Image (spheres, rainbow, N blue to C red):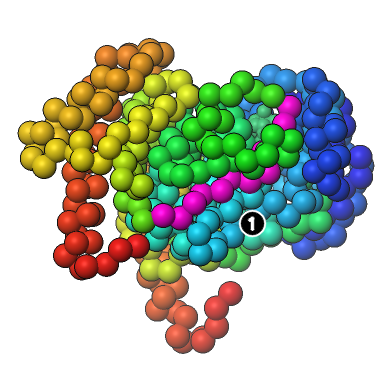
Amino acid sequence: MKIHLWLNEREITREIDADLPLLEFVRSEGCYSVKRGCETSNCGLCTVWMDGRPVLSCSVLTARAEGTHITTLEGVRERAEAFGAFLAKQGGEQCGFCNPGFIMNVLAMEDELTNPSDEDIREYLAGNLCRCSGYESQMRAIKEYLRSRKDELPLNGETE
Amino acid sequence: MLRINEYRRVESLEEAYGLNQKKNNKIIAGGVWLKIGDRRLGTGIDLSGLSLDYITETDDVFMIGAMAVLRDIETHPGLLAYTDGAVKESIRHIVGVQFRNCATIGGSIYGRFGFSDVLTLFLAMDAEVELYEGGMVPLKEFVHMPYDNDILVALHVKKKPIHIVYKSQRNTATDFPVAACAVSEYDGKLHVSVGARPARAELLEIASDAMPGTEDGIRAFAEELAGQFVFGSNRRAGAEYRRHVTGVLLARALRELAGQKQHERRNGEMK
Ligand SMILES: Cc1cc2nc3c(=O)[nH]c(=O)nc-3n(C[C@H](O)[C@H](O)[C@H](O)COP(=O)(O)OP(=O)(O)OC[C@H]3O[C@@H](n4cnc5c(N)ncnc54)[C@H](O)[C@@H]3O)c2cc1C
């Protein structure tokens, strides 16, 4: 079947199988940050945005993405690098396998929640599993990152 | 792995219903549940072109379209206010935000899963399912119906002066619950819904004046209630454990319910 969508703002039309998961599709288009970490829709490694909302690309069929804008880590490089620096500073990236999905969800959280509490952050990110760490370093990195963004915003006066 | 020969984004419910009569065709809602099984479908029926992702609130009803995702339900201001946050409490533990941006109310209610938080919650409200062929069916009847080839179009929740509390327990965060219950009071009755038995949620309805006024009374009453449900065992928990934990959760829910009523009396307001 034919599919037409935007991947990281690149408009594409492709012939696909009806049952092709979005995860395999975006990887076939060169977005290798997107990974499969489980077979049960639990790990969050495959997180991409569909029209700006984080979804599990392992569970969404490519056919469902017709007409939508799909964003992967490759499409938000600047923001990902900015947060990635905080993650690295706290030793939060560890083996790195879960980072892309995790970063996509942290950025989605930044866009969706205003002044999230620790509890809000934990709840928003509960679907992103990391088997290296105890999540403490990630928590520190997120809080420092959000704080820095808050300090920054009034200076340049713009939001993304 | 989910295998599909053909994917059809239907243009009407009639078309969806027609296709759904064939044994190896299936509705694909969020597809999250379908995806984890090993299935081969002839045609995957996609309802996403029918604008069924609405949540509409009027003076006397909430109408939730079958394709509304769980995340939209747990963050809906009207539903949050109506349920005093119980809707969020029942949904927020389900896997993660990315998951809940995919999973739909239609799939959750149609599936009548034995672990369902969502079904357990809505069973304690005055809810009806709108079926394409079967029309309006009270949720408490739908929960016992066998799986058929009808299409769930929407869930309707009648607005009434209500108090409702939701409680669940998991072995580990984001796993299925091992105990889940919702307790509500409306129309002069207590409505006690117990899920994760682990079988389809069940509802008990009792006159409101059965509610004890003392702490000891509440504890005994909650245990007695838990004793009226049938529990089973699986690898997550045994039947006795589920019964015990359900009793504890019911007591907490009843206490909170009493607290809500007290608070309301003090403020002299009625929802
Ligand atoms: C790993 C995992 C963990 C979960 N944990 C929990 C949990 O802790 N608590 C909880 O409450 N739930 C849990 N769920 C269930 C989840 O919340 C959804 O209820 C479930 O995924 C079904 O929703 P869906 O939109 O994905 O449906 P789908 O997978 O698309 O469909 C499920 C079934 O319903 C049928 N169907 C879907 N929509 C309709 C319709 N409108 N009319 C007729 N038939 C229809 C489909 O044909 C299919 O048979 C979990 C699911 C998974 C996969």
Q: Is mark 1 within 8 Å of ligand 1?
A: no
First to last magenta residue range: B149-160
Query: Residue shown at 22%/68% (left/top)?
Result: B268
Which residue lies at the image location 80% right of the left edge and 35% below the top edge? B17
Whereabouts is ligand 1, in terms of quadrant? top right
Residue A46 image offset from top left, x and y in percent: 61, 42
Please tell me which residue lies in front, A116 or B247: B247
Q: Which residue is mark 1?
A: B54
Residue B2 showing in the rendered view: yes
Magenta region includes residue B154: yes
Q: Nearer the viewer, residue B253 or B8?
A: B253
Residue in front for this viewpoint, B98 or B60: B60
Q: Is residue B47 left or right of residue B147?
A: right
Give the amino acid at mark 1: Tyr
Residue A107 percent location from the top left of the image: 53, 60
Q: Is residue B269 rendered to the left or right of residue B106?
A: left
Count of numbered marks = 1
Residue at image location 42% in from the left, 20% down from the top:
B198
